[in-house]
Image (cartoon, helix red, strand yellow):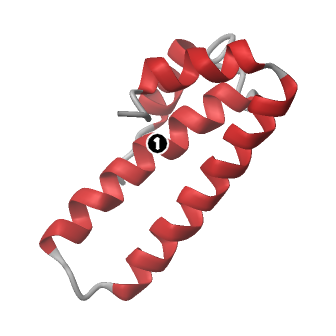
C-alpha cells in the first residue's frame, strides 16, 4: 500500500495534536492532501483511469468541506493549515 501506518502517524503527529489524534480537522486535511497528491500523480500517468478520477474529485470535496468547517469555526487554524500545506497559490 502506498501509505503505511508509520507515514499516517507522521502526518497526524506533524499536523494534528499527536500521532494518535486522527480526528482533528487539521490531521484529516493533511491526510486528504497527501492522498490527493498521490492520486494526481497516478492520473498523470494513467489519464483514462476514470474510477481514480472520481475518487480524486470526492476527496477534493471532502477536503473542501473540512476547510469550510475550519473557516467557520476558527479562521486562525484555517490560515495555519493552508499555509503549512501550501494549498493556496
Residue sitting at 30 percent across and 59 percent down? 40
Q: Position of residue 72 (x, y in %)?
A: 84, 32
Residue 2 is left or right of residue 34, and the answer is: left
Front-most of 32 and 76? 76
Label 1 sits on residue: 33
Q: Position of residue 51 (x, y in %)?
A: 43, 84
> Residue farthest to the front?
89
Q: Position of residue 66 (x, y in %)?
A: 72, 42
Residue sitting at 75 percent across and 31 percent down? 71
Q: For residue 21, what is the image quadrant?
A: top right
Front-most of 86 and 29? 86
- Count the labels in the image: 1
Residue 86 is left or right of residue 29, and the answer is: left
Q: Position of residue 89 (x, y in %)?
A: 35, 33
Residue sitting at 34 percent across and 60 percent down? 39
Front-most of 50 and 78? 78
Residue 38 is left or right of residue 25, and the answer is: left
- In this picture, is 24 found above or below 53? above
Residue sitting at 66 percent across and 55 percent down? 62
Quadrant including the N terminus: bottom left
Amino acid at each position: 500500500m502506498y501509505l503505511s501506518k508509520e507515514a499516517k502517524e507522521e502526518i497526524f503527529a506533524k499536523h494534528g495534536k499527536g500521532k494518535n489524534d486522527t480526528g482533528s480537522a487539521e490531521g484529516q486535511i493533511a491526510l486528504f492532501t497527501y492522498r490527493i497528491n498521490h492520486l494526481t500523480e497516478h492520473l498523470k500517468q494513467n489519464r483514462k483511469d476514470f474510477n481514480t478520477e472520481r475518487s480524486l474529485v470526492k476527496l477534493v470535496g471532502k477536503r473542501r468541506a473540512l476547510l469550510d468547517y475550519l473557516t467557520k469555526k476558527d479562521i486562525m487554524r484555517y490560515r495555519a493549515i493552508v499555509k503549512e500545506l501550501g494549498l493556496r497559490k
